[in-house]
Amino acid sequence: MRKLLISELRYSDWLQPDDVVGWPQGPGEPLALTEALIDQRAQLQSPGLLFGLTQSDTLRPELAESFALHALNGAGSSRRVTAFSEIYPGHVSQIPGLLRGGVLPLDVVLIQVVPLGRDSYSLGVISDFTQAMISRARVVIALLNPALPAMLGDAIVRAEEIDLLVDSDSRIIDLPDPVPSEAERAVARQVAALIPDRATVQLGVGTLPAAVAEALMQHRELGVHSGVVSDVLVDLVEAGVVTNAHKGSSAGKTVTGGLFGTQRLRDFAATSGLVEMRNVEYTHHLSVTSALDQFHTINSAIEIDLSGQVNSEIAAGRYLGAVGGQVDFVRAGVASRGGRSIIAVPSATPDGKHSRIVASLAGRPVTTARSDVDVIVTEFGAAHLRGCGLHERARRLIAIAHPDHRDALQAALKN
């Protein structure tokens, strides 16, 4: 392992022509390394970038003139460049295999780490498919970041896996929980009514998960098993709502692949001993999730058609979302004993002009098939679709659509 100061890093010494450079999602992005890469782009020969959800200012449309862009999704600030990117739709659970098999392009990976001891480091805030990126890459460049929490489990990186260690930067991308709208809070109340005490829940991050966490504050002895978690986890634990005592596995621990929050979440994870960092081949694997007791998965969508097909990827012709872990968790909720899979959306767009329940997806992506869908929830109620025929599905979905759009949906159904 070679060591350098950040000022001494020259990517042209490490990259070959047409190499693809990738980095972990969200707060796992090593800002000093990605900033240097962008700054040095003129000295590189036809490089590519591989990225998932980003929450930084790294990706900008003008970068398409210097890099071939490869997007795993359009979440967060990645949506600014998806119009210029090759997009790879796929389930999160499949990404490690696609990386290790060379199907997804990756030659150089940029990570950030905090020392654990003489021979190991921690990725701190991320463990989702980062280990697979490390095993696939020809070159692993790691940024020392002493501000990272020293998390264990699948966040551990061996010193021998790192080719270049760069010193140093203490910035971490903060992801504070957004403030939900009143419509989202109303949806969340409907969701919470479906979740019993002692259930295990998967929440994710964003305004709707924050609203659901708010609505769960009167529940007791819940567990959490989720691809990523945010600061609301701390709220739920401190309120005595989440104990993780009845999950059926990892008793007493919240299992996650990413700490997508602020310093409050990072401090909690580092000091409490109540958070277990695992990769997506564990967090999203059906053999694991189906064994959880009363696993209730909560996901959102862009739109749902009257047969129950779910589009979580494209809106107004732009790729804004992701396949992500939605299908993995939809199937998990149905497979779990006593579990449910919930897709929750406000019934209309914020301006009220467009229904989120539509007559047809009209060629837009089917992220989750109608054969997998269990329960659809809006602020007007829950439509239980599993086992329902197509005509009954449409009736139930129209009943929870926004009242301003129900007549149009009914008319479309008759045509």
Image (cartoon, helix red, strand yellow):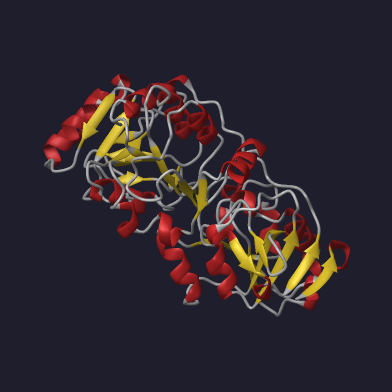
The answer to whether 141 appears left or right of 408 in the picture is right
Q: State the image quarter where residue 36 is shown.
A: bottom right
Q: In the image, residue 411 lies at what x, y percent?
A: 20, 29
- Depth order, front residue of 203/364: 203
Residue under the image location 64 percent in, 38 percent down: 262
Residue at image x 28%, y 52%?
290
Q: In this view, does 19 lie to the left or right of 316?
A: right
State the image coordinates of residue 228 (x, y, percent, origin top left). Answer: 50, 46
Q: Quick check: 349 left or right of 277?
A: left
Task: Please tell me whether residue 210 is drawn above or below residue 24 in the rendered image.
Answer: above
- Residue 185 appears in which quarter of the rendering? top left
> Quick check: 12 above or below 177?
below
- Residue 68, how many percent across, how many down? 62, 66
* Residue 270 seen anywhere in this rendered image of the structure: yes
Let me know if residue 352 appears in the view.
no
Image quarter of the N terminus: bottom right
Q: Taking 238 as reference, is 263 left or right?
A: right
User: Where 231 falls versus 313 (above or below)?
Assistant: above
Residue occupying image coordinates x 46% and y 64%? 95
Comparing 230 with 44, the one in front is 230
Give the residue drawn at x 64%, y 78%: 138
7 or 362: nearer the viewer? 7
